[in-house]
Image (cartoon, grey):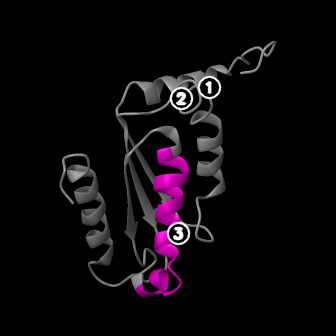
């Protein structure tokens, strides 16, 4: 903050979300990929809640963990074809998490989410469950 600049108050809705975040040491985001990026609603949430004086700037989220579960309609091969997986992981792990002081951040992709193959949906749910169960415990 520069000299003469006052802190802007947050709305009660934002204060509530910020308090929810402060009460925990881990953040989990589950979202569909839209054009190889976060959907607008999640991007807006991050822009509003994970902001200056809360997640970076005078305060940060050092000591927090972040798990990003990205639902991808494409196959793993399609995701890797142009290194989309690496670009998305770098954006989330470095561009957002690390910028906020979170050094323990992981992106887990759930592929072919629109598939109706027998057992695929259950396999995706199990993958997501295992990612959350083991995340932050030094297990992969």
Residue 13's disc number: 1
Q: Residue at x 52, y 66 (%)?
A: 88
- Is residue 34 placed above or below 59 in the rendered structure? below
Residue at numbered disc 2: 17
Q: Residue 34, position in %: x, y?
A: 60, 67
Q: Residue 69, position in %: x, y?
A: 41, 59
Residue 87's disc number: 3
CA distance for labels 3 and 1: 32 Å
CA distance for labels 3 and 2: 28 Å
Q: Are marks 1 and 2 in contact (CB under 8 Å)?
A: yes
Q: Residue at x 50, y 79 (%)?
A: 83
- Residue at the right extreme? 4
**Residues in magenta, as a range:** 77-98
Density class for disc 3 (Cα within 10 Å; few <14, some 14-19, many ≥20) is some
Residue 29's disc number: none
- Residue at the front extreme? 3
Q: Secondary structure at mark 3?
A: helix
Image quadrant in which the N terminus is located: top right
Q: Secondary structure at mark 2?
A: helix
């Amino acid at each position: 903050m520069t000299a003469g600049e006052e802190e802007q108050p947050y709305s009660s809705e934002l204060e509530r979300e910020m308090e929810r975040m402060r009460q925990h040491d881990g953040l989990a985001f589950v979202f569909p990929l839209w054009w190889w990026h976060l959907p607008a609603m999640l991007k807006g949430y991050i822009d509003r809640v994970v902001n200056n004086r809360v997640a970076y700037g005078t305060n940060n989220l050092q000591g927090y963990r972040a798990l990003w579960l990205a639902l991808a309609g494409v196959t793993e091969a399609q995701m890797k074809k142009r290194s989309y997986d690496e670009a998305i992981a770098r954006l989330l792990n470095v561009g957002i998490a690390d910028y906020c002081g979170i050094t323990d951040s992981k992106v887990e992709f759930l592929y072919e989410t629109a598939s109706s193959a027998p057992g695929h949906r259950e396999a995706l749910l199990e993958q997501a469950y295992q990612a959350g169960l083991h995340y932050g415990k030094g297990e992969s």
